[in-house]
Amino acid sequence: MGPPRPNPSAGTLSPAIPPFAPTYHWLADGAEFFCRLQRGIQVARVSLRLEVYIVSDDAVGARIRDALVAAAQRGVRVRVLLDALGSHETANGFWDGFERAGGELRWFNPLRISGLPIRNHRKLFVVDDRVGGVGGFNIADEYSGDGVHRGWADLGLSLTGPAVAGLAEEFDRMWEAVAHPERLRSLFRRGPRQAGRILMEDVQLLATGPGRSPGAFQTALRRDVAVASDVLFAVAYFVPTWSMRRMLRDAAARGARVRVIVPAKSDVEISHRAARHLYAGLLRRGVEIYEYQPQVLHAKLYVTETAAYVGSSNLDTRSLYINHELMLRLTRPAVVRRAWELGELLASRSLRVDPRTWKTSRGFFDRLRDALAHWILARADPYVARWLVREPR
């Protein structure tokens, strides 16, 4: 991997620029994430924003909820935005004490058939408009560990500085949309998709939602991969669309080293099988595939020499075209170098899939199940989502 080079991108500057200098800190595992999150909640004095797909009714979920209750009791404005499907097990009684303490709770897309396919898969937090963070972490026991000996392997980023205002604004946009049914419906329409926003010279916010055209994340990623000589992805659910597979194949064909780290064991078996359906074609074109061994891999990290992406988006149809997702694109050289270090660490704990023996190692029925899984996720799921979430008449 060569040294990171400057790579400016287009966008509009956020109007809110706080006066303090930015800092960036990669969250290398769940233990560090929960330590940072809980500490942020404990020191908050004015406001807390938390948006997450899953909060589980378990020890970790209760610990974070109790910290939020304590913050609300000391006068902090605490707002929590949850997905109604992802956090369904905490819908009955779990948050009663939080709301009694003055905390504010909203649910994205209450469960009903017509809107069921569209989920808010984003993860972000903002403390006192001064510290923010994004990543792949949900709030549940399985995320609390080092990703090697215990707990799933995941990544995130905590930051301070002007970019935090952009995270706060993005939370507020979704918070207000959920409160107004007419705005909420607008999130399901297939109109023009939201463009990326430059929060600072070296930080771009990429928010995506339902749509048929490429969103901000895949548009930016294609630009970076198109000129890269070294590409490393670590992704939990790897069922890329045809255009994303072409992006990887084209990069490998022109001589770039392209590595993709995926789980050896997954919490979503159908996604695991669908990914394996694609191995042979990618391996044949020079893409290197590695399977992470110690624990379930839940990270979403995409790195080239000039840019690192971190946030909630997987590389599958649901993340790219159906769910709401949030990614940051970072180009500060030191931040990109640290992303490479974390990616290489994941690679060192993975086994490379042998392109010479992969195809013959899969029996007929395994290949058939893999193909069926891919058809369900890549074809049937988007079709059903489009049919259920029809345009308003």
Image (cartoon, rainbow, N blue to C red):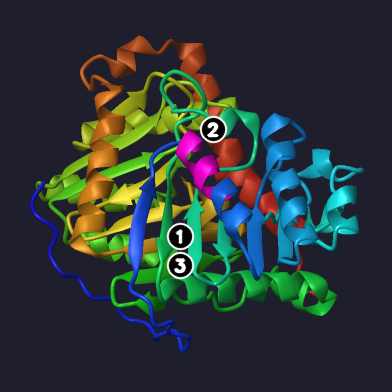
Most extreme residue toward the bottom is 15
Give the side of residue 76 with respect to residue 363, left or right. Answer: right
* Element on which disc 3 rests: strand
Residue at image coords 71%, 66%: 76
Q: Quadrant of residue 27?
A: top left
Q: Residues within 10 Å of mark 1 (few under 14, many from 20)?
A: many
Inspect this view and state whether residue 89 appears.
Answer: yes
Mark 2 or mark 1: which comes first in sequence?
2
Q: Nearer the viewer, mark 2 or mark 3?
A: 3
For residue 86, say whether it is visible: no
- In the picture, the disc for residue 206 is 3
Which residue is at a point 37% across and 82% down the rendered structure image? 11
Q: CA distance from mark 1 to mark 3?
A: 5 Å
Q: Amino acid at mark 3?
A: Leu
Q: Are marks 2 and 1 in contact (CB under 8 Å)?
A: no
**Between 111 and 254, which is closer to the camera in this rendering?**
111
Tell me the tag on residue 327: 1
Tag 1 and tag 3, C-beta contact below 8 Å:
yes
N-terminal of the two: label 2 or label 3? Answer: 3
Report the span colored magenta.
30-37
Residue 149 located within the stretch drawn in magenta: no
- Residue 331, given in percent of the width and then of the height, sits at 25, 64
Name the residue beneath numbered marker 2: 271
The part of the image, by quadrant, that contains residue 290 is: top left
Q: Nearer the viewer, mark 2 or mark 1?
A: 1
Question: Magenta region's main secondary structure?
Answer: helix
The answer to whether residue 83 is left or right of residue 308 is right
Say left or right for 57 vs 306.
Answer: right
Q: Residues within 10 Å of mark 3 (few under 14, many from 20)?
A: many
